[in-house]
């Protein structure tokens, strides 16, 4: 019997594209998000925020994005979505049926001490740098799916790198991979496998 798995679309945007189309993006995105982005002092922070604004405006069907008490953005009538950024990339994950969390992290040895501080149990037996970053992204994507804060990083599991994890008696399925020297993880609520449909953005348009 053929089983149709859930699909999560993951849009990946390099902020160099935002820099090259700065005027277009600032005019295209929602005014409140544009104002928020331009308040950042550092150019990179501006570009990351503008990139997030572009993805939200382009790929979500409604501008009525709200925030939960924990600060997680959501749409009342779906779809479920989550956003993350690191280094030169902004990513937007969109799923139809279940709460979603996404995390992207640049693989950078200078972050290893922080990652190792977050490890527990069998996670401390992992030494491969890519696997360490995938565990970190797994933790972050689950935290974001749960609407928890980064201070809870040690209480959630980063293993397995792909498969079911349990937190507070609920199950969550995670898939993770290395993408252009970045760790990328997506977590959905539930125990069913799903497909990740990666969609790199190659040009900016309305």
Image (cartoon, rainbow, N blue to C red):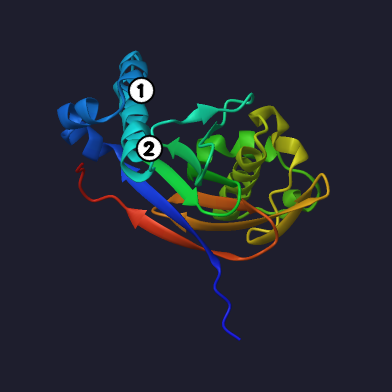
In the rendered structure, are the residues bearing label 2 and label 1 in contact, judged by CB atoms less than 8 Å apart?
Answer: yes
In the foreground, 164 or 67: 67
Res 138 label = none
**Residue extending furthest front?**
77
Which quadrant is the C terminus positioned in? top left
Query: Where 155 falls versus 151 (above or below)?
Result: below
Closer to us: 5 or 78? 78
- Where residue 202 appears, as percent x and y from the top left, is 23, 51
- Residue in the image at 48% along x and 56% along y: 178
Q: Which residue is mark 2?
A: 56
Looking at this view, is 178 or 129 the one in front? 178
- Residue 147: which quarter of the image? top right
Cα distance between the residues tagged 2 and 1: 10 Å
Locate residue 150, reporting x and y percent.
Answer: 64, 30
Q: Is residue 120 above or below residue 28?
A: below
The residue under the point 63% across, 49% down is: 135
Relative side of 19 to 136, left or right: left
Q: Which residue is mark 1?
A: 33
The tag earlier along the polypeptide, 2 or 1, is 1
Estimate how packed mark 1 is, as few (under 14), some (14 to 19) or many (20 or more) residues with alpha carbons within 10 Å.
Answer: some
Badge 2 element = helix
């Amino acid at each position: 019997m053929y089983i149709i798995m859930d699909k999560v679309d993951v849009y990946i945007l390099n902020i160099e594209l935002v820099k090259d189309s700065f005027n277009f993006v600032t005019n295209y995105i929602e005014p409140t998000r544009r104002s928020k982005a331009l308040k950042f002092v550092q150019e990179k922070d501006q570009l990351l925020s503008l990139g997030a604004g572009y993805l939200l405006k382009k790929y979500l069907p409604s501008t009525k994005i709200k925030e939960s008490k924990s600060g997680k953005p959501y749409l009342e009538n779906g779809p479920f979505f989550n956003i993350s950024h690191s280094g030169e990339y902004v990513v937007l994950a969109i799923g139809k049926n279940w709460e979603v969390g996404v995390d992207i992290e640049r693989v950078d040895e200078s972050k290893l001490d922080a990652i190792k501080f977050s490890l527990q149990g069998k996670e401390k037996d992992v030494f491969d740098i890519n696997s360490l970053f995938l565990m970190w992204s797994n933790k972050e994507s689950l935290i974001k799916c749960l609407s928890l804060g980064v201070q809870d990083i040690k209480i959630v599991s980063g293993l397995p790198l792909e498969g079911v994890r349990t937190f507070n008696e609920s199950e969550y399925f995670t898939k993770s991979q290395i993408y252009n020297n970045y760790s990328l993880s997506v977590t959905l609520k539930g125990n069913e496998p799903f497909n990740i449909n990666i969609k790199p953005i190659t040009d900016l348009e309305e």
